[in-house]
Image (cartoon, rainbow, N blue to C red):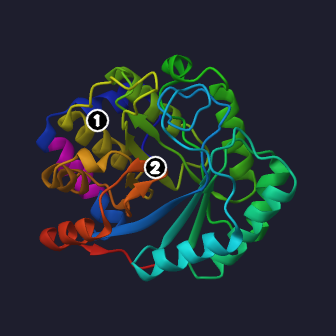
Amino acid sequence: MLTSSIAAIAKIYHQPLPDLLFEAQRVHREHHDPRAVQMCTLSSIKTGACPEDCGYCSQSVHHQTDLKPEPLMDLESVVAEAQVAKAAGSTRFCMGAAWREVRDGAQFDRVLDMVRQVAALDLEVCCTLGMLKPHQAKQLKEAGLTAYNHNLDTSPSYYEKIVTTRTYHDRLETIRAVSEAGISVCCGGIVGLGESVQDRLDLLEALSNLNPPPESVPINCLVPVVGTPLESASRIDSIELVRMVATTRILFPQAMVRLSAGRLEMSDELQALCFLAGANSIFTGAVLLTTPNPERSQDERLLERLGMIPKPL
């Protein structure tokens, strides 16, 4: 992590694009193989009926979307998905459940079994299950969890315009519990929520103030879903997205910067620019939780055209 000063972050972000990309590529090459992109798979192990009111999400009970809720998957189905993901080149398998928070009991015990069995496949294993208490984070660590995803989404000041059923402080408390349990933190945000550039800089400042800094920083582009409050949101400008990725790379030299949701709407050229800016991970497979994503074969063709390779475990 370079700095947590908002003025310094703004100076990085607003510099001429050639200079910004040059600095990001220099930092990237110091810490990573510039040709390698980690392939990850994200599975929705429990879909819909979430009590949270996140304005971007198709899974909220507060929104009238076409999503059909589904219960927590059985252990065997999840392990089978992980095996398919590994065979296709993914080295990290992520499991997402549409819960507000983890509750002790049979369902959490099943998730712990999922973590154990996916970890036994020699995959990195990540979960995003909502808010955690410290003892639950410790249980996940003991089960073999590699990382826990819990995004800050946006700036502290803009957050309450997107989510009202939990606070920024709630998010930070879960991240603290994860860190104290010795689990790597995967924490990033979403752009295209109607936020200002200043909100994006404030998000980066909040991320840079996490201690330890996140091991993984996902940059998601909003995928507007009909029936949600943000269904008519405008797409983020492509150059602004590249600036966000490059600034993230400079601020978090050792982290995996994950180009996450919204790639289906990105041209090959925009994705290539994001890789040049320091993104070095993508999620593969036709669905990313509940939103469309490029087919794995499409990603393979893109990497081949760019002379890039899947990152080995």
Which residue is disc 1 drawn over?
Answer: 12
Question: Magenta region: which residues?
Answer: 19-27
Q: Is residue 132 left or right of residue 252?
A: right
In the rendered view, tell whether residue 137 sits above or below residue 2: below
Residue 114 in the image: x percent, y percent?
A: 70, 69
Residue at 30% over, 63% down: 295
Which label is found at residue 217? 2
Query: Residue type at mark 1?
Result: Ile
| Image side of residue 49 versus residue 20, left or right | right
The picture places residue 240, in percent across and down from the top left corner, at 23, 33
Q: How many marks?
A: 2
Up/down of 57 relative to 162, above or below: below
Q: Nearer the viewer, residue 243 or 78?
A: 78
Mark 2 residue type: Val
Query: Which residue is found at the position 39% from the left and 28% from the top?
Result: 201
Q: Quadrant of residue 110?
A: bottom right
Q: Are marks 1 and 2 in contact (CB under 8 Å)?
A: no
Mark 1 and mark 2 lie on one chain; the one further toward the N terminus is 1
